[in-house]
Image: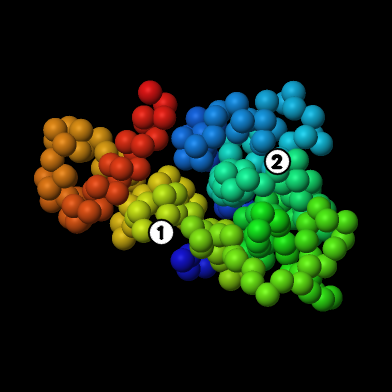
Amino acid sequence: MQDYNFTSYEAHLEELHVGRYAIADVSRWTGLSAGRVRRWLGTSGSYPPRLRLVKRHESTPINLASFLDVVELHMVSELVKKGMNFKKIRASLHEAAQLNEVSHPLARQKYLLHAGRLFMPSEKSGIYELDAGGQLAITAIIKHRAEDIEFDPKGVAERFWLQGRNKGVYMDPFVTAGIPVVEGTSIMTEVLYEAWRLEDGDTKIVAEQYGIEETQVRYAIEFESGFRKQVA
């Protein structure tokens, strides 16, 4: 987790909104087509604002994605995979953003998923179900929807485990400017992958070169190889 060396929390949030990722990279990391990424972020300029999925921060350049953009897209992709209706997702996100006056509602810890429906805790009573006409839902078990995300003390995403926490690769805006790295290091996965290629696939030599475990090299190779196959 991030140790806060900033003079204010606002400065911390600004880093999360910095446009640092090309659309092609976001496509690889989320498993979404570049066209869908552009539509959902509204970066093409031709997509009507009311149909855009992600409520972006006004400071993020239109042709780049921020860390919170990537997290939000990943979460939407997961919801679609789990069978949630796309129009319901869009309506829920728009409602959540308006109610709380924030961007990237799915990148915030208080949002929950249960049985294909989105919820958020209500300060008044119960659990508020999004896109349900203001309904307060009462449910005994609500599963948190963000197993692969770490949050800052105020509940905003700040670290994202791209293949799951057991696969050793994460992105963090405060480590190597948010480029994916291997757990326990600040070594970028693309660096380890290229070294592995130059060494004709010898993970032991690469591990010795960088002073890490072979398992960590394999995490990087698995991560980079998987996304490069998608592009090929």
Image location of residue 8, percent across then percent down = 63, 66
Residue 76 visible, this orientation:
no
In this rendering, position of residue 177 left or right of residue 86: left
Task: Categorize mark 1 by other alpha carbons within 10 Å: few (<14), some (14-19), many (20+).
Answer: some
Image quarter for residue 115?
A: bottom right
Q: Looking at the picture, which amino acid does disc 2 mark? A: Phe
Between the residue at mark 2 and the residue at mark 1, the CA separation in whole angstroms equals 27 Å
Residue 76 versus residue 133 in the image, above or below: above
Q: Which residue is mark 1?
A: 165
List x then y, in percent, for residue 215: 22, 54
22 lies above or below 60:
above
Amino acid type assigned to the residue bearing label 1 in the image: Arg
Counting labels gives: 2
Quadrant assignment, res 140: bottom right
- Please tell me whether mark 2 or mark 1 is closer to you in this view: 2
Judging by the rendered image, the residue that carries numbered circle 2 is: 86
Q: Residue at x 75, y 27 (%)?
A: 47
Q: Residue at x 87, y 61 (%)?
A: 134
Of 168 and 17, the residue lying toward us: 168
The earlier-in-sequence mark between 2 and 1 is: 2
- Secondary structure under tag 1 reads helix
